[in-house]
Image: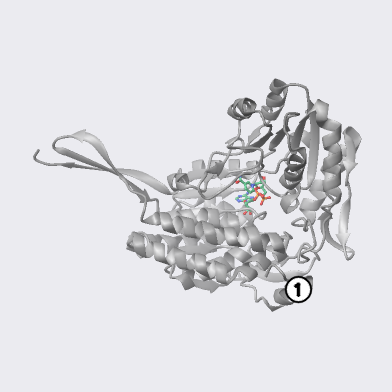
Amino acid sequence: MLDYTLEDWRSRAGQISFRNKAFIDGKFVDAVSGKTFDSINPANGQVLAQVAECDAADVDLAVAAGRRAFEDGRWSRMAPGDRKAVLLKLADLIRANLEEMALLDSLDMGKLVTDAATIDAPGSAHFFQWYAEAIDKVYDEVAPTGPGDLALVSRVPLGVVGAVTPWNFPLDMATWKAAAALAAGNSVVLKPAEQSPLSALRLAELAAEAGVPDGVFNVVPGFGHTAGQALGLHMDVDCLAFTGSTMIGKKFMEYSGQSNLKQVWPETGGKSPNLVFADCENLDAAADMAAFGIFFNQGEVCSANSRLYVERSIKDAFVEKMIARAEGMQPGDPLDPASKMGAIVDEKQTEDIMRFVEGGKKTANLVAGGERAYVDGKGCFVAPTIFDDVSHDDPLARDEIFGPVLSIIPFDSEDEAVTMANDSVYGLAASVWTDNLGRALRVSDKLMAGTVSVNTVDALSAQTPFGGMKQSGFGRDLSLHSFDKYTALKTTWIKYQA
Ligand code: NAD
């Protein structure tokens, strides 16, 4: 697959039959209303599929199916080893269908198929495998009570977990929620983003093929203000795991208060700072990763390193390095293995990004990009864009642009760098480049971010929690800590004759 040409990928894309119905209670079904919406390829504007447009009626059916499955124990009380075997099989099936899974995300939201095939789809299989393997290795507790008392503290599944996910990593965001929630024994109702529902629907089908029982994993494609809101307000959903914008994360907190006080786990926006100190020895590596940190996935990454703070003594030289890298990362056909960046998810997001870029041209120093781009005269593409000498208070440095737009800001001291980095409503991730160990530890300690990467960017693994501080939300995906979201602590106290 890694030696595929553009023609190979195009021909394989032409052979896919898209799953376009909702997946409820183990079956593909039309929306109750019969309505559909178009799923559009942003690289060329073509309609890929007309997808079932679920609303509250479909969410009701999916939640009821999830509840039935949870109550009768077909999954929630399955022996841990058996549940593990099913999810391991799902991981294998994702690997067996890697090419198709990669193509679904690439066609649906514009990411490079090469990235989807080497990062997203293998990542999904890996995360399912990781949580499957954890199922029969996580033990509960016996509390230190005393003679005559035995207090068991166990983690029990919550019931029906609603998951609402964004479009930037469609398969992986669905996986981050579903793998842990299913491993913990819950039923799941997933609402993927309306821009990119196709991989989640195929994932549900593969889950059924792997042996996930009917009703345990449901997917309801549809819009946020209908299907998403219905899940958020549902009286029989026990937990709502959300990844998306801060604005909608706040809405889910409100929905919970207006309904059944379901647990809400928001993982939301970011404006991650990347601090490059003059004592960083390998400035070329720092520039390579700074470029990756903002241009990977077209900058549509919640933890994108969109604010680059560079110590003034090396700033001009570093800006030159960044310009060179931006020039080498022009967007192209997402199916072309030679392309360095893909398409922006849709027309609206492209226009939103360009609004920031046009504003920035009046307030900062544009040194790379700054234009909308087209491939074969079509599509939603933005050239990798860099602004230098950005004022710390400029919207370029404050707002989450969610596109390939980098703001460079000089600093004169460690304290100033940390103060500016922390002066944000967000706190998802941060990076520090230095060869001074004391500085690395001191600065990491002070940065208010869920993940601080030193001499790299966006460090992430199944073994480590991912999530934010401040208005980046407080949910944590990945690692065993993710089970905290999908289980309740239950005490069972037994008195006996000591
Ligand atoms: P979004 O908030 O617009 O949408 C996310 C999901 O919420 C979609 O499924 C959408 O349909 C649904 N939704 C929208 N309006 C809703 C409403 N009124 N009620 C209920 N549901 C609603 O975000 P997006 O544009 O899809 O994704 C981009 C955002 O996601 C960025 O802010 C990015 O930082 C964030 N993100 C965060 C993480 C993280 O882990 N912290 C990861 C990826 C993306």
User: Disc 1 designates what residue?
Assistant: 10
Does 252 sit left or right of 389 as displayed?
Answer: left
Please tell me whether mark 1 sits on a helix, a strand or a loop. Answer: helix
Please tell me which residue is depicted at 69% across the width and 21% down the height of the picture.
Answer: 415
**In the image, what residue occupies the spot 72% across and 26% down?**
417
Residue 295 picture location, percent across and down: 76, 48
Mark yes or no: residue 173 visible: yes
Q: Is residue 309 left or right of residue 211?
A: right
Q: Is residue 427 left or right of residue 27?
A: right
At x 71% / y 64%, what residue is drawn? 113
Q: Is mark 1 within 8 Å of ligand 1?
A: no
Residue type, mark 1 in image: Arg
Residue 146 coordinates in the image, percent (x, y): 18, 33
Foreground of the two, 215 or 306 = 306
In the rendered image, the vertical position of residue 483 relative to residue 276, given as above or below: below
Tell me residue 419's x, y (percent). Answer: 69, 24
| Residue farthest front in this picture | 281
Q: Quadrant of residue 363?
A: top right
| Number of residue marks | 1
Q: Is residue 24 visible?
A: no
* Residue found at x 49% / y 67%: 90
Please tell me how crowded label 1 is: few (under 14), some (14-19), or many (20+) other residues with Cα within 10 Å: some
Q: Quadrant of the C terminus?
A: top left
Closer to the camera in the image, 445 or 264: 445
The quarter of the displayed image where residue 400 is located:
top right
